Image (tube, coloured by chain):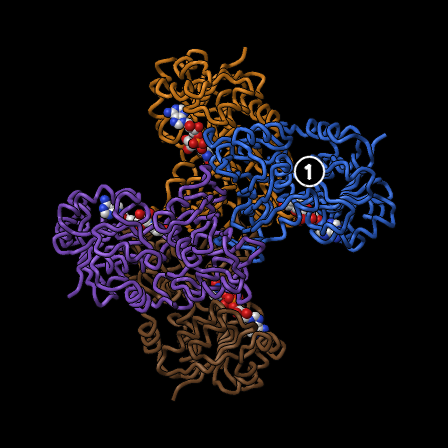
Chain colours: A blue, B orange, C brown, D purple
Amino acid sequence: MKVKVGVNGYGTIGKRVAYAVMRQKDMRLMGVTKTKPDFEAYRAKELGIPVYAASEEFLPRFEKAGFEVAGTLGDLLEEVDVVIDATPGGMGAKNRPLYEKAGVKAVFEGGEKASTAEVSFVAQANYEKALGRDYVRVVSCNTTGLTRTLNAIKDYIDYAYAVMIRRAADPDDSRRGPVNAIKPTVEVPSHHGPDVQTVIPVNIETTAFVVPTTLMHVHSVMVELKEPLTREDVIDIFEDTTRVLLFEKERGFESTAQLIEFARDLHREWNNLYEIAVWKESISVKGNRLFYIQAVHQESDVVPENVDAIRAMFEMAGKWESIKKTNKSLGILK
Amino acid sequence: MKVKVGVNGYGTIGKRVAYAVMRQKDMRLMGVTKTKPDFEAYRAKELGIPVYAASEEFLPRFEKAGFEVAGTLGDLLEEVDVVIDATPGGMGAKNRPLYEKAGVKAVFEGGEKASTAEVSFVAQANYEKALGRDYVRVVSCNTTGLTRTLNAIKDYIDYAYAVMIRRAADPDDSRRGPVNAIKPTVEVPSHHGPDVQTVIPVNIETTAFVVPTTLMHVHSVMVELKEPLTREDVIDIFEDTTRVLLFEKERGFESTAQLIEFARDLHREWNNLYEIAVWKESISVKGNRLFYIQAVHQESDVVPENVDAIRAMFEMAGKWESIKKTNKSLGILK
Amino acid sequence: MKVKVGVNGYGTIGKRVAYAVMRQKDMRLMGVTKTKPDFEAYRAKELGIPVYAASEEFLPRFEKAGFEVAGTLGDLLEEVDVVIDATPGGMGAKNRPLYEKAGVKAVFEGGEKASTAEVSFVAQANYEKALGRDYVRVVSCNTTGLTRTLNAIKDYIDYAYAVMIRRAADPDDSRRGPVNAIKPTVEVPSHHGPDVQTVIPVNIETTAFVVPTTLMHVHSVMVELKEPLTREDVIDIFEDTTRVLLFEKERGFESTAQLIEFARDLHREWNNLYEIAVWKESISVKGNRLFYIQAVHQESDVVPENVDAIRAMFEMAGKWESIKKTNKSLGILK
Amino acid sequence: MKVKVGVNGYGTIGKRVAYAVMRQKDMRLMGVTKTKPDFEAYRAKELGIPVYAASEEFLPRFEKAGFEVAGTLGDLLEEVDVVIDATPGGMGAKNRPLYEKAGVKAVFEGGEKASTAEVSFVAQANYEKALGRDYVRVVSCNTTGLTRTLNAIKDYIDYAYAVMIRRAADPDDSRRGPVNAIKPTVEVPSHHGPDVQTVIPVNIETTAFVVPTTLMHVHSVMVELKEPLTREDVIDIFEDTTRVLLFEKERGFESTAQLIEFARDLHREWNNLYEIAVWKESISVKGNRLFYIQAVHQESDVVPENVDAIRAMFEMAGKWESIKKTNKSLGILK
Ligand SMILES: NC(=O)c1ccc[n+]([C@@H]2O[C@H](COP(=O)([O-])OP(=O)(O)OC[C@H]3O[C@@H](n4cnc5c(N)ncnc54)[C@H](O)[C@@H]3O)[C@@H](O)[C@H]2O)c1
Ligand SMILES: NC(=O)c1ccc[n+]([C@@H]2O[C@H](COP(=O)([O-])OP(=O)(O)OC[C@H]3O[C@@H](n4cnc5c(N)ncnc54)[C@H](O)[C@@H]3O)[C@@H](O)[C@H]2O)c1
Ligand SMILES: NC(=O)c1ccc[n+]([C@@H]2O[C@H](COP(=O)([O-])OP(=O)(O)OC[C@H]3O[C@@H](n4cnc5c(N)ncnc54)[C@H](O)[C@@H]3O)[C@@H](O)[C@H]2O)c1
Ligand SMILES: NC(=O)c1ccc[n+]([C@@H]2O[C@H](COP(=O)([O-])OP(=O)(O)OC[C@H]3O[C@@H](n4cnc5c(N)ncnc54)[C@H](O)[C@@H]3O)[C@@H](O)[C@H]2O)c1
């Protein structure tokens, strides 16, 4: 028996999760919702995915274009066991009553407040917390990135401080700026630190900045250690950590551009880099302080988490069994 | 029997052509050259492609990194029937004597002068000219783009004028600028017009500008017609033209960002968009003037031309047979 | 006697026109309106400019910040003979009834439709048309730029075609994108051509593109001549044309970045480059076609036009007398 | 008697220092050197500044263009008491023997190693150290920025950590990239921290990143305090610190774009923002950690330091007397 999955909100995250679901042997994608018949809607149809209107109000747009939909969100909810809510940030909270009423479980994304769900989730950090739950929130791309590496060294952390240099817009977004400025989040520390704490109990503070690039976020991480760790220890730990990869500038990775090129060279779908990329040369210990620099592919790092969340919610697999299945199905390198 | 192909210069163009060659049933990729053991070199090895040092002088780099090469360019040339020279612009001319000496045919790229080869080539425009030749130049990404659409309407052209808005750097290049400026080519008309004339005898002038983006070039084309054509005629012609696709803003294609997203949604390798993208709404006839706007994916539009050039040089197939084979092997939509 | 001027909408254009008005001996700046007490409002106050709330609804914002305003727009209108409406595009049309009721003349900007005013205005092209008028529209930055150079050669123009490569956002705007894309106006020809025709009767068509830069717009102009002109003729004509300057790549002007640097080196306020910048090397005649490339400083080229419009509306000076006064007061080079 | 000053290297920094020197009553600008007759050379001439060829080898360029120079660097050195060496980074060290031979003092810039001069200098931090010296290095824009604020609170600092988000290219540079990537300095901690220590003995570490913008650098500063300080204390201290200004997001400063707009609104020459800009809202104390975010106008923050360095080297004024004179002459707000 396969878990029946619907995706509400078929944008950057939604379309990637839909793809990932289609590659799982224990899941079945029942359909996705769209608000308009754009090229993504046509593509979904070509792939044989049933396309539903996100609500009745959008039906006229589809009709006008002669695009036949399979129904509306309400119809989709009748077909599924769980819905992935990948609508724009904040909308998930408004949608939750619909899911409750339809009696379907739901996975929310990082644009929702933690309180929207029962648990905030990063598979390798707290898979067990989601077992049997009805409402799980996969945390944001940045929080997922920080959690993956910090969780691996969490026993050594006295205090962590991360500066987040964020991409301004996703690659397919030609509206958002800035074109030529650096934009700080002046509320310091920023809200990103506490968000990590919804997943793991680590003492962390963050500041954040937006810069004019589309490819990836970059984090400058500094950790004050409570137990000694050497550079080599950290390298070993990260090499043993799933969904984290080490990259060497020495091999040509001088910026986020070459990290994405690496994913392109792998012929990853949408150049997804599901793994957090840590620059090996940047890992450094001075006294009781550990430093490292990592990059996060905002479009895709949370995708495997969505798949694992479903498995946990339906108690379909244990933690490492699910992570392994997901990794293998998506070509995640380790 | 398969034609044995080597690739000298495994960068943006070289790696894509190598990939395309590997997908042809009548060709065999014998190896590629690299100047250093960067991640692209490691990737090639992973794919089972023999990696040669581009020349003896680069050997120490590979040795130092413990990267075993299959030999040097000289060794590769002994294995192949034809070499794709995708070295940086201008270097091909210097390499030609090596190829002559080794008795191998060579395909050059658009960074070389027309005089470097016997014929300048765009498959759908002048395949026959390359039949049996030893040295063929696949023209630049921009020239290929202009030739594909202009060739389709060439009998109607009295005069063509194209303004080319060029991407500043390829996506994997984090060195070239500008960051925030528009850079005109002040020599007007620019050299791009005459380059089209090395392929088809059309009366054309061009101007060119560099802008801070990495995704695609965009051309604003204006044609003075010698015979009447309607907007619908042009749409029909372009719909019948191979390696040209119509895109509608109506469907969400509001910039080059969504065109690339379309290729990503198709899961094209490296988001290649081999086809020239014409905005359907932009096709317009006013009096005797035809206007249209097209975008060119500089990293990939010339790739199928390289494959077809090889077939022509070895007289392995007629024009449409080759184009069809290439298109099919690469998933080119039409 | 001095004409009393108010500025409604103190943003990019409004603050520059206010500055220019303050430098005219025959005008007096009575005040400006603001919607919020941001740094521009504080700066105005520091300069001794009376600041009015743009309407009653905005008063609470000022009160909350303890920023004392001189009144609201209604109060300002009672003080002035003419108002410069530099509110966001389209808002001027809605404001016109207010000005009519208050019995003040008004200058509108290029974001308004031509029908909002009695005449569309570029001083050197049609100053006389604005003599004694009550409502005049200074055309957009792009239209002003095209009109200045085309007007100088209008007797030779059979047909003009301009491709406009537009900056995405003004330098002080950190919201608008795109970050990494080229965005065509797919309605071809674009509306910019007809806008030139509201000022001079020239046969013109245009296409337009937005690119990720903030500094200037660039135009690639092609003109089909009805009378022969040589490159040298055109250089002579442009050298004799007010508010047009020739720049040589030879002297380091390789992009819009150096044009702006030139204005910065002059210590122009806000690096205003009131003059249209034509690349001298780009001026070229091939057969009956003239080509040239020009750059337009969108933030400032329309500023002198606003000043001249006021003089014409109050019949305070003849065309060249006004242009000379304005040029001298702003340090316009010729 | 006025100190006679020459400027070797009339680029971003050199032209600003030359301007600043011209505004000092106790200094006289004797000339500047150029390597080519570009628009900056012509502008210098227009301003009445004698232009010398940077060396004999460059003379032909000037002759070819018919640009008369006043001599070569050697001639300029005979006229001056001190030279500002604002040549590209690393060239100053090579030039020092020339200055020694000519018996002139020299100020070097931040692109030189500390060992090139006798003292590394930021006026408000260590003016006295430069008194009577022959060779002084004004530290880099980033080091100057960090030193200004850290020096003000240095007695409270146990440990400081700064993440530097650097502009990729200066506004007049249309060659350097990246266009769309974030580039970390993978050597962690970076060399910027130790550079601060050449001026003040503070325990500091840094990491650095390059992003595609031209306007300003931004620093995310975290300080571990050895003595308690409140947010209000820090605000008070920074308000009392020369060449440091507080800016409020509340007033519209949401990114570096508006900071530069502020300088433009002041009609500062080249929109120089000599003062380090600290976002007031970002100043925050959590436990024993102080956070703040500051922006540095790389083109101009070191300019007043150059002027003060000269006064110290010739013992023309005490620390605060010099700083006051410099501030007043340049319109520095405090
Ligand atoms: N893009 C990222 O970098 C990223 C990374 C991690 C998490 N997230 C989170 O994922 C969620 C989705 O973000 P995204 O980036 O995919 O956004 P997106 O804008 O790319 O996609 C959202 C999709 O929802 C659709 N939509 C809008 N209104 C809807 C409605 N009423 N009902 C159904 N669908 C509707 C939109 O048309 C769009 O296709 C957010 O919570 C976001 O914070 C985004
Ligand atoms: N990138 C484009 O947009 C594009 C489009 C069409 C045509 N072209 C043309 O294709 C050719 C290759 O351009 P590219 O963009 O792939 O360049 P690239 O810089 O991406 O790749 C060139 C490769 O050649 C290697 N190389 C350097 N020196 C070499 C040597 N001596 N021997 C062998 N290899 C050497 C480089 O290491 C690099 O891997 C040029 O003629 C260019 O004009 C480029
Ligand atoms: N920026 C340019 O490149 C440019 C060039 C030429 C012409 N124009 C035209 O000039 C006009 C103004 O454009 P801008 O670029 O200066 O815009 P802007 O956004 O910089 O300035 C508009 C100002 O009007 C204020 N405003 C908003 N609502 C208002 C209201 N109800 N009443 C009064 N003021 C209000 C805004 O706060 C802002 O300060 C538009 O018509 C535009 O098309 C702009
Ligand atoms: N631009 C900044 O952000 C910045 C900030 C602070 C300090 N600095 C430092 O200031 C120094 C100058 O940097 P810049 O940004 O002004 O560089 P720049 O490139 O703008 O200017 C350097 C000037 O020196 C000239 N030059 C080149 N070779 C020369 C030679 N042999 N003799 C004389 N002049 C020569 C160049 O033509 C140019 O005009 C460097 O040490 C740099 O590290 C730069």
Residue at point 55%, 82% (across, down): C99
Residue D202 in the image, given as x and y percentages of width and height: 41, 49
On screen, C123 above or below B66? below
In the visual, does C203 lie left or right of B251? left
Residue B168 in the image, given as x and y percentages of width and height: 44, 43
Which residue sits furthest front?
A: D227
In front of the other: D141 or A283? A283
Residue at point 45%, 64% (across, down): D237
Residue at point 40%, 36% (across, down): B195
Q: Amino acid at mark 1?
A: Val
Does the image show residue B237?
no
In the visual, does D223 lie left or right of C125? right
Categorize mark 1 by other alpha carbons within 10 Å: few (<14), some (14-19), many (20+). Answer: many
The residue that disc 1 covers is A303
Residue B142 in the image, given as x and y percentages of width and height: 46, 38
- Mark 1 lies on a secondary structure that is helix
